[in-house]
Image: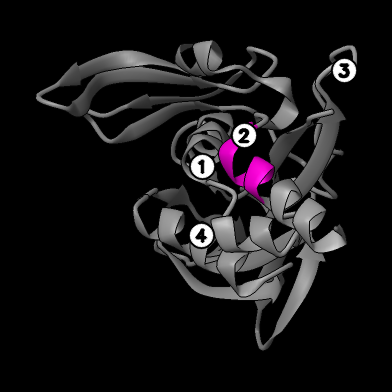
Amino acid sequence: MRAMLMTRYSLLFSLLLVSTLAFGQSPSEAGKLERGTLTKGQPTGTWEYFDEAGQLELRMNYDSSRISYRRPDTARYELRINDSWQLVHPNRAPGLLGSRAGRRQALQKAIRYPVAALQQQQQGDFLLSYVVQPDGSTTDYTVLNSPSPACSEEVWRVLQQTSYRWVPAIYQGQARAARFYLRVRFELAMVSRFAEPKARPVVPPASGPFMDALLIRAVGVERR
């Protein structure tokens, strides 16, 4: 009997999936994070990028390849200085050449809870580190923690399909490598079909400006 219940539990999760957007966003808010003109699929002219609160983060002129505005950032970042990683205040903070909120939303929509992880009821935090190099490229992707190999493969699958450019950090007059993190929380939940709907859970705040946090939540409906 227990085995039958567990099988039904897993099947319900595999059939009834709900992806909860990080920071409580809905898909309809995606267009609020960036504003500009596309010409043959490419951004042209001036583009503006915003955070979740609607505050301007970046203004970029793609015709001249110049940034006309970046929101001031006095936070500390992990930079590669000489042969060690140090948490310092850079003269120019590293940052995505675009909307980080938009990137989070795109990743959130693309990542799916792996069926193998659902069947084995595996949940927890996937944590990935990567390095923004002095030329703005990203390298050295390293999985630091994962609830299962299937979860790691799913996040990596989505990352391989995306491409972003970054503004490198400047410290003591030199472009420096900066380390960033991506945390994806895979969470299972079982609710009664007769229960009152609960408020959408929100991802806990990240630990610093170098962390992006997502929540992938699978919801199964308990049948009686």
140 or 10, nearer to the observer: 10
Between the C-alphas of marks 4 and 1, the distance is 11 Å
Mark 4 or mark 1, earlier in chain: 1
The image quadrant that residue 22 belongs to is: top right
Q: Please identify, in this view, whether the residue under mark 4 or under mark 1 is nearer the observer.
A: 4
Q: Residue at x 51, y 59 (%)?
A: 154
Within-10-Å neighbours for mark 2: few <14, some 14–19, many 20+: few
Numbered range of the magenta stretch: 11-19
Identify residue type, mark 2: Leu
Identify residue type, mark 3: Lys
SS under mark 2: loop
Q: Please identify, in this view, whether the residue under mark 3 or under mark 4 is nearer the observer.
A: 3
SS under mark 1: helix
**Which numbered marker is on residue 198?**
3
SS under mark 3: loop
Within-10-Å neighbours for mark 1: few <14, some 14–19, many 20+: many
Identify residue type, mark 1: Leu
Q: Vertical placement of 99 versus 1: above or below?
A: above
Q: Residue at x 70, y 62 (%)?
A: 126
Which residue has dot 1 on it? 107
Which residue has dot 2 on it? 16
142 or 36, nearer to the observer: 142
206 or 125, nearer to the observer: 125
The image quadrant that residue 95 belongs to is: top right
Determine contact: label 3, label 1, CB under 8 Å: no
SS under mark 4: helix
Identify residue type, mark 4: Glu
